[in-house]
Amino acid sequence: MEFGECGMGIQGIGKALTAPCQGIMEIDEENPGSTSVAESSATVADAQTLVSTMDSIPVQPIHPIIPPLVPPPIVPPIAPIPVIPPIPILRPLAPLPVRPPVLRPPLPQNGEVGASDSDSDHDDSGPTRTGLGSAAEYEISEESKLARERQEKAIQELLMKRRASALAVPTNDMAVRARLRRLGEPITLFGEREMERRDRLRMIMAKLDAEGQLEKLMKAHEEEEAAASATMEDADEEMLQYPFYTEGSKALLKARVEITKYSTKRAALRLQRARRKRDDPDEDLDAEIDWALQQADSLGHIERATDVAFSPVDNHLVTASADRTARLWNTEGSLLKTFEGHLDRLARVAFHPSGKYLGTTSFDKTWRLWDIDTGVELLLQEGHSRSVYGLSFHHDGSLVASCGLDALARVWDLRTGRSIMALEGHVKKVLGVSFSPNGYHLATGGEDNTCRIWDLRKKKSLYVIPAHSNLISQVKFEPQEGYFLVTASYDMTAKVWSARDFKPVKTLSGHEAKVTSLDVIGDGRYIATVSHDRTIKLWSSSNNGKENTMDID
């Protein structure tokens, strides 16, 4: 029975082993798509179940020989691989039908109405017609038209420049002017230079060449050019000569010779006096200046006219007027001579140091030199771009300074007639100018309310005096030694300044209107001023301040 029990136990084990195997087979039939990893896991589990069942059954001392079971390594489960759907196979598309081109009639012109089948064409075109239309079906915008016009214009200009560069244009400026005159064009424009004039001629010729008129015009003037070629060459040579000058009269030559002789002697005396003052230990310059300033401080006022100047050698004075004349008077009020010739009103008059010549300035942009004895005009001098206002002769007689409304002061050499210096510094009109007796200082005053002292040796401004509250109409140095300077202004005053440090010494108040001019006579003891109050005022220290007046009609 034990053996039978043992046999039954073996059969039970067999059944137990058979049952799991059947279960596994059923599972396999139900899940045919399971992986090998799941099968190995199930086998391992069945083996473990078998081992545990055998351990629970009592076994007799007779043990069957069973090979040891080695459990396989446990493999972690792996996620299933996603299934990629198959790519569908595209069928080839049928080719698009080729549409035959549509022939359109030409566009209507001169207001004609287009064909009636245009609507049908638009209907047939459909949505695909928008992208396949020709360029003639689009409307050109205004911007496109303007851009096309600019492009065409630029092309025309480029062609014009190419045509102009191929033309032969004369290089001589006089020849350029002559050709412009023959073509009926202005020979020069305002501010035009030689190269600009030549370029303008080139463009004119290119334009005429493009229009087919250049050969006709040049042929029409060919005979005239050939006839006048010799004359034009001579004229060109004469006009190209530089510097240009006008031949003076014999009287002017004689006057310049006399001025040269006179100024040479005066310059030698001035230098001799300067050396004596420098070498003489007893010479007290400060004492002389103080004495001159005291004399100027005691000056009074007298009456005036338009402009007045005293003769350096005679008891004569000269006045200037807006009637374009200058008149010479004696001290008794008698008219001696009238100087006529200016084309506009006179501004200033001045005597040459020799007393033989008279200088006048005018608003006709010139200043003139006159012979006092004969009243003949010796020199008409141009040089200022605007009206000439002030004039002053050098004490040696060799130089003359002029100033004008062009904010410039010029220094002229009377011996040669040349402008030797142009003094720039004032920002407005220059109305007064005066040489110092020392020979190298020059004073100018103008509408900028300042008086400038120039050093002719350095050719620059030495000192600027903010003299008045209104424009300065005239400046004058004391004629003997130049110890003081007098300025007249439209602020109705005249002021005396020290030539040592250019500080104010005396203010001469008395006029009731603008003071337009002044003059200093002799050793500085007399000063004459003129004003718009129709009076001339003369101040002198010799009569203890007594004021004398003279009415000028």
Image (tube, rainbow, N blue to C red):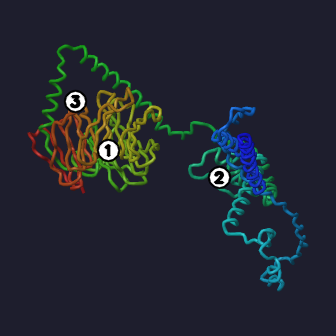
C-alpha gap between disc 2 and disc 3: 56 Å
* Image coords of residue 405 (percent x, y): 38, 47
C-alpha gap between disc 1 and disc 2: 39 Å
C-alpha gap between disc 3 and disc 1: 20 Å
**What residue do we see at 18% from left, 48% from top?**
537
Mark 2 closeness class: few <14, some 14–19, many ≥20 residues within 10 Å: some
The N terminus: image quadrant: top right
Instruction: Work out whether mark 3 precedes mark 1 in sequence or the reverse, and give the earlier one.
Output: 1
Q: Which mark is residue 373?
A: none
Residue behind mark 2: 187
Residue behind mark 1: 446
State the image quarter where residue 118 is shown: bottom right
The C terminus: image quadrant: bottom left
Residue 205 visible in rendering: no
* Image coords of residue 411 (percent x, y): 40, 35
Residue behind mark 3: 501
Residue at the left extreme of this rendering: 544
* Secondary structure of the residue carrying numbered label 3: loop
Q: Is 386 on the left-hand or right-hand side of 193?
A: left
Q: Is 327 on the left-hand or right-hand side of 535?
A: right
Q: Is 189 on the left-hand or right-hand side of 367?
A: right
Residue at the bottom extreme of this rendering: 116
Marks 2 and 3 in Cβ contact (< 8 Å)? no
